[in-house]
Every structure is written in C-alpha cells, then in structure tokens.
Amino acid sequence: MIPYQVIVRPVVTEKSNELMSYDNQYVFEVHKRANKIEIRKAVELLFGVKVDKVRTMVVRGDIRRVGKFYGRKPSWKKAVVTLNAGDSIDLYGGEQE
C-alpha cells in the first residue's frame, strides 16, 4: 500500500485535541488492513516527523435506525500515533512562515 492509501483522514474530536496538546499524540483513521509498521512509515513520509509509538484499534460500527429498519454503520480502524518530542503535525493548515 502507498502512504496515501494507509492514512484515510485525521480524527478531530475533543479527546484527540487534548491528546495533541498534552501528549503529542495524533489520531488517524487508517486502512483496515494496515499494520503498525505501515502506519509508522506513512506518517513519517507524509508529514516529515519521527514516530515514537503507534497504537491501533478497530472501532465497531454503530447500529442505526431509520423508521422501522435497522442497519449498521461500517467498522473502521483507528491509530493513535505518538511523535518524538519536538515534532508536531499541523492538521488545520495554519499560517506558514
């Protein structure tokens, strides 16, 4: 897999923002078949940072209801990437100097 296929999107929630500011950890939705080594290489290549640790988990899809019909949202894989001290990723595309 190429790095652009491994990382689907960043996950931006209140909890992930706290992890970014306090622990230098970033949360990404990744391809379901990607392993920790592929995730580490993709983040290092795409963002130009040094990865310290990668934790992964599979998030189960919720059961949703529309009228009398029930359905299920798809499951997806989440990766929490810890960067070395001094490295950071600009997810919001702020000003560049």
Image (cartoon, rainbow, N blue to C red):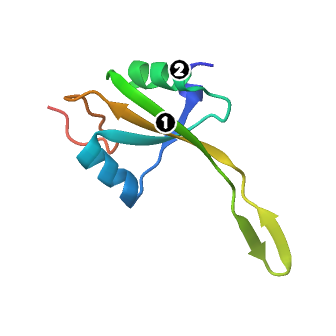
Note whether residue 47 is visible: no
Secondary structure at badge 1 equals strand
Q: Are the residues tagged 2 and 1 within 8 Å (C-beta)?
A: no
How crowded pointer 1 is (Cα within 10 Å; few <14, some 14-19, many 20+) is rated as few
Q: Quadrant of the N terminus?
A: top right
Horizontal and vertical percent for residue 55? Answer: 49, 36
Residue at image point 74% right, 66% down: 63
Extreme residue in the bottom direction: 67
Q: Which mark is residue 55?
A: 1
Q: Quadrant of the C terminus?
A: top left
Residue at image point 46% right, 48% down: 11
Rendered view: 47 above or below 14: above
Note whether residue 90 is visible: yes
Q: Is residue 22 left or right of residue 77?
A: left
Secondary structure at badge 2 equals helix
Residue at image point 42% right, 52% down: 12
**Dot 2 corresponds to which residue?**
37
Horizontal and vertical percent for residue 81? Answer: 41, 34
* 24 vs 90, nearest the viewer: 24
Horizontal and vertical percent for residue 43? Answer: 43, 26
- Amino acid type, callout 2: Ile
Q: Is residue 60 left or right of residue 70?
A: left
How crowded pointer 2 is (Cα within 10 Å; few <14, some 14-19, many 20+) is rated as few
Disc with the residue nearer the chain's start (2 vs 1): 2
Rendered view: 79 above or below 44: below
